[in-house]
Amino acid sequence: MPAFKTVALLGRYNTPHNAESLVQLGDFLVERGCAVLIETRAAENAAVSQFPPASYDEIGAKADLAVVLGGDGSMLAAARHLAEHEVPLVGVNQGRLGFMTDIALGRMLEAMAQILDGGYSLEARTMLRAEVVRAGASSHAAMALNDTVVNKGAIGRLIEFLVHVDGEFVYDLRSDGLIVATPTGSTAYSLSSNGPILQPTVPGFVLVPISPHTLSNRPIAVSDRAKIEITLKHGLDARLHFDGQPECDLQEGDRVVIERAPWAIKFVHPPGYSYYAMLREKLHWSEMY
């Protein structure tokens, strides 16, 4: 009996090679005794009909595991859709860096066989929930696994905003924006803006200014139980992003309230997974030149 009885397949299948990998994995799972679902849009894009299509809600209700074939962007999208359903994710890397996709494409069937045999570990990853408060009322809300970012838009001018943590004033900042990142997101946009890397189980968030006007403004780590408030003072074209996806335009006076989401997403790691080995590989640490 496989460790996961119903497995959903997700991802972006925009090339014949990607679609072939999907079919290969689906056939393998069926041979191992699993019921296989494929996310509706993935089925359409890959032109695959041998597995029943399912919406994210249906996957949330029926699946024991979701396998994402793609890159980190595909993992982020799956996490936002499935966290509240408590469906764990495992990733097969068909992207570039792949900080969250543990399984190399060439080892896909071998690694999935080990997972189905019970050879895996589970790790919970904290998520963010952000809400825009405008004129005293909530105007937008969403979740993110990597980060929530307030930044300037197309005009290209600095924006100015106030930052409070648990109601306490932190600073009045003029910059290109501010990244609020989870430990998972600390290796994404935050890292490229000189933010620290947080090990995934660290109970914290990092606040990373983007090109601050005052060079003494440095990244700050805060508890993941804190309430972070960003109030836009000046910015004619400021925008809010979740996991790199534009969510809404901001107006002067808007407050973005960021807290730990009520759900975490669980990652399934294959045997031999090491966070530090992943960092060495992806960031080319300890290489000899």
Image (cartoon, rainbow, N blue to C red):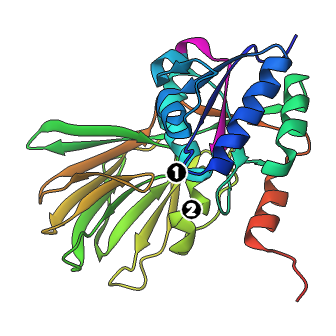
Q: Is residue 63 magenta?
A: yes
The stretch of residues the image draws in magenta is: 61-69
Q: Is residue 160 magenta?
A: no
Q: Tell me the crowding category of disc 2: few under 14, some 14 to 19, or many 20 or more residues within 10 angstroms, Cα based.
A: many
**Of the pair 115 and 55, the residue shown nearer to us:** 55
State the CA–CA distance, disc 1 to disc 2. Answer: 7 Å
**Of the pair 87 and 164, the residue shown nearer to us:** 87
Q: Quadrant of the N terminus?
A: top right
The kind of residue on which mark 1 rests is Asn
Left/right of residue 223 with respect to residue 258 in the rendered view? right
Q: Is residue 185 above or below residue 265?
A: below
Tell me, yes or no, if residue 183 can be seen here: no
Q: Quadrant of the C terminus?
A: bottom right
Q: Which of pointers 1 and 2 lies earlier in the amino acid sequence?
A: 1
Q: Give the residue furthest to the left.
A: 135
Instruction: Measuring from the top left, give residue 5's x and y in whole percent.
Output: 75, 13
Tell me, yes or no, if residue 157 can be seen here: yes
Name the residue: 76% across, 47% down: 102
Left/right of residue 61 with respect to residue 274 in the rendered view? left
Q: Which mark is residue 112?
A: none
Q: Quadrant of residue 28?
A: top right
Q: Which mark is residue 146?
A: 1
Q: Are marks 1 and 2 in contact (CB under 8 Å)?
A: yes
- The residue singled out by tag 2 in the image is 188
The kind of residue on which mark 2 rests is Ala
Instruction: Measuring from the top left, give residue 183's x and y in whole percent.
Output: 60, 52
Instruction: Measuring from the top left, give residue 149's x and y in whole percent.
Output: 37, 58
Q: Tell me the crowding category of disc 1: few under 14, some 14 to 19, or many 20 or more residues within 10 angstroms, Cα based.
A: many
Name the residue: 87% across, 79% down: 287
